[in-house]
Image (spheres, helix red, strand yellow):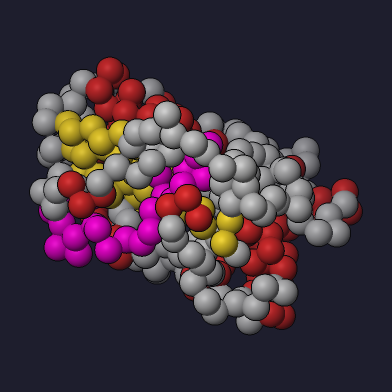
Amino acid sequence: MTCILPPGVRPADARFSSGPTKKRPGWNLQALEGALLGRSHRSRPGKAKLKEAIDRTRALLSVPADHKIAIVPASDTGAVEMALWSMLGARPVDVFAWESFGEEWVTDAVEQLKLVDCRIYVGRPYGKLPDLALGRATADIVFTQNGTTSGVKIPNFDWISADREGITFNDATSAVFAQPIEWSKCDVVTFSWQKVLGGEAAHGMLILSPRAVARLESYTPPRPLPKIFRLTQKGKLVQDLFEGATINTPSLLATEDYIDALKWGDRIAASRHCKLVQMPTPTCSRNGWRGRPGLSSSCPMRRFAATRACASRWSMNV
């Protein structure tokens, strides 16, 4: 039986990781005064608000210009399953899991999609990383960058081949804005607002590399796709989805709250010289990883990340 030591360091606030996270410092209802209420999300001002959320996301995360970003239904779960159901099946698949949400993607691959040549690597005991080196360059790879429920993260992206033939699916919902993302190694990245900077629930973000777009436009999955999963029309990507249009009705109130959080992150990055793509990662000492140097411990964005990037059951080296 594995002995799990109590954490040596506890978060200053318990509202982290498993969402919704706490609101930004100083947040109040006045932050929502610019919300476009009582207007259609299809109106010009409505689409402009949604496009602003996309553009601010790109800027704050330094998402490459050739990557597509969309606001999608059903939180991170919707974003992940939209990608899996639309793209998996074109080639072999390797799925890595070490916490409950990652194991949901295992269920999708094995029991729902019934994929051929699908290799499953589940870490045991709970929270232990499987051997990431087993990922095949010829296969699509599905993984969770930071385990929402276990608090265990990948050490880096070195295990993903730069010359891979498959595409990678990174469920980054408890990593984005707190840990670096190596965009050249990630073809599909997903997250949700409620695990990101204190946003509200129900909206997911889907980021696609050119390789992911090529898969969508070249592969037709042998299964029916519900409306909320459809990213292509007549074999071409629905470009409007990445310019402020949405598949179903979003909340413009929640959109305003997300924009406010992005503005706050931008202010922190500017005032403290905190480059989020170089964020030192608060990691779990259980696995022997330490956060990389680079930011002062006084940086508010680092302190915020520290409370949400690692589950409280493990001690953190911050």
| Whether residue 255 is visible | no
Task: Please state the horizontal and vertical placement of residue 80, each as a whole percent of the image.
Answer: 41, 37
Q: Quadrant of the C terminus?
A: bottom right
Going 63% across and 58% down the picture, which residue do you hit?
306
Depth order, front residue of 172/214: 172
Q: What is the span of residues highlighted in magenta in the rendered image?
A: 144-167
Depth order, front residue of 302/198: 302
In the rendered view, does 253 fall on the left or right side of 250? right
Q: Residue furthest top?
A: 111
Task: Please state the horizontal and vertical placement of residue 41, each as a whole percent of the image.
Answer: 63, 42
Task: Please state the horizontal and vertical placement of residue 282, each as a whole percent of the image.
Answer: 55, 60
Going 38% across and 41% down the picture, which residue do you hit?
128
In the rendered view, does 166 fall on the left or right side of 301? left
Depth order, front residue of 286/144: 286
| Whether residue 12 is visible | yes
Task: Please state the horizontal and vertical placement of residue 145, each as a whole percent of the image.
Answer: 41, 50
Q: Quadrant of residue 187?
A: bottom left
Going 43% across and 39% down the picture, which residue do you hit?
127
Depth order, front residue of 48/212: 212
Would you say residue 67 sits in the magenta stretch?
A: no
Does residue 264 lie above or below 30 as drawn? below
